[in-house]
Amino acid sequence: MKEDPRHIHISEYNYPLPDERIAKFPLTVRDQSKLLVYRHGEVTKDVFTSLPDYLPKGSLMVFNNTKVIQARLHFRKETGALIEVFCLEPIQPNDYVLNFQQTEHAAWLCMIGNLKKWKDGALKREMTVKGFTITLTATRGECRGTSHWIDFSWNNPEVTFADILEVFGELPIPPYLNRDTEESDKETYQTVYSKIKGSVAAPTAGLHFTPRVLEALQEKGIDLEELTLHVGAGTFKPVKSEEIEGHEMHTEYISVNRATIKKLIDHDGCAVAVGTTSVRTLESLYHIGVTLAENPDATEEELHVRQWQPYEKYDQIPPVVALQKILGYLDRNGLEALHSSTQIIIAPGYQYKIVKAMVTNFHQPQSTLLLLVSAFVKGNWRTIYDYALSHDFRFLSYGDSSLLIP
């Protein structure tokens, strides 16, 4: 029986992170960030443009092409109180693409800033979108945990919810940057390959990539593939419980094309993941395949990867077989892409199935992302973080990067 990670004490994953080590802004040239290289226990440093030198020809590199939405909406009550409505995930319709295309009404699960000042009544804001003057109304519905159901309505069928967010929304940069969003963040807090709108946080390992680095990877004979995981606000949620069993992971929505599954199979179910979001998606694919091996007729809801699922079933089916099960499921249902969701928590005790190397930034102390890294490097995370701290690496979203090869 493998070790059960539920009783891990999060306090063992703490380290001193002075505020001056947190990068408040990105470098002017993305790919000039430092690259920490961890290979089989050895740590060295380089510059990000050298990344292709460390990867074998014929590798498959997987990127998350999600795009950060301008998810923060600000309303002012007649009393003058400022209320922030932070869109987390769509409820009605619950498909991102359909929701963004809605005209006149859309419902989202939202976090509310200054909630105590919004006792009752609807919030209203007048704005000009695409030359039309409209009034956006937000009405509060039921409470769900720390979030609320919010109905948005507006009085013009020519305007979509995407148009409103584009004009009226603000990009949600991470709270630990301790500053307001600036105009420059609209560009710098998106990866150069972002396409599919839906995240409330950037997959930040991807922020280092530039067209020239992507080109150099392809010249080296490295296959590049994309998938989508919409990053939820849960990515910033600190672990408050002493043992991680008490921490609930937010559900995140994933979409992986049939061609990408096929490419993974062609690479023996092995991939280099760019960012922890790609890691969570790739590893979730294995567990979705395990579910399909047991129940080929599973519904989309049954394919959801529960937080502790990987630790409850110790299945030994090879990754390629798991991926073939997904391919079979897509073919039987005439689908071009797998749409599912995951709450996977990757912590020491987890056995990685698909990810063989990862590109990732330096994460917050006592975070689930640090647990994910620790599981990958067999508990050797302190060696990496001590090196980064003593060699002047910049930390968190806009900070430097690492390539981890266990």
Image (spheres, grey):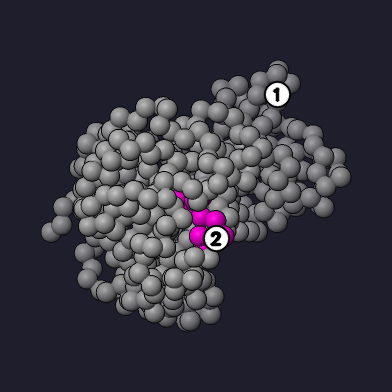
Q: Which mark is residue 56?
A: none
The image quadrant where one finds the C terminus is bottom left
- Report the mark closest to the observer, 1 or 2: 2
The image quadrant where one finds the N terminus is bottom left
Amino acid residing under circle 2: Arg
Residue 212: within the magenta?
Answer: yes
Q: Residue at x 74, y 51 (%)?
A: 160
The x and y percentages for residue 21 are 40, 32
Q: Mark 1 = which residue?
A: 77
Task: Give the residues in magenta.
Answer: 205-214
Amino acid residing under circle 1: Lys
The x and y percentages for residue 207 are 51, 50
- When the figure is inspected, residue 375 is found, relative to residue 54, above or below; the finding is above
Q: Which mark is residue 212?
A: 2
Sort mark 1 into few (<14), some (14-19) or many (20+) by Cα contacts within 10 Å: some
Taking depth in this image into account, of 164 and 333 the one nearest to the observer is 164
Q: Residue at x 49, y 71 (%)?
A: 219
Residue 37: within the magenta?
Answer: no
Sort mark 2 into few (<14), some (14-19) or many (20+) by Cα contacts within 10 Å: few
Q: Residue furthest left?
A: 1
Quarter location, residue 245: top left
Secondary structure beneath label 2: helix
Residues at marks 1 and 2, CA–CA distance in whole angstroms? 48 Å
- When the figure is inspected, residue 258 is found, relative to residue 177, above or below; the finding is below
The x and y percentages for residue 348 are 23, 50
Q: Residue at x 24, y 33 (%)?
A: 11
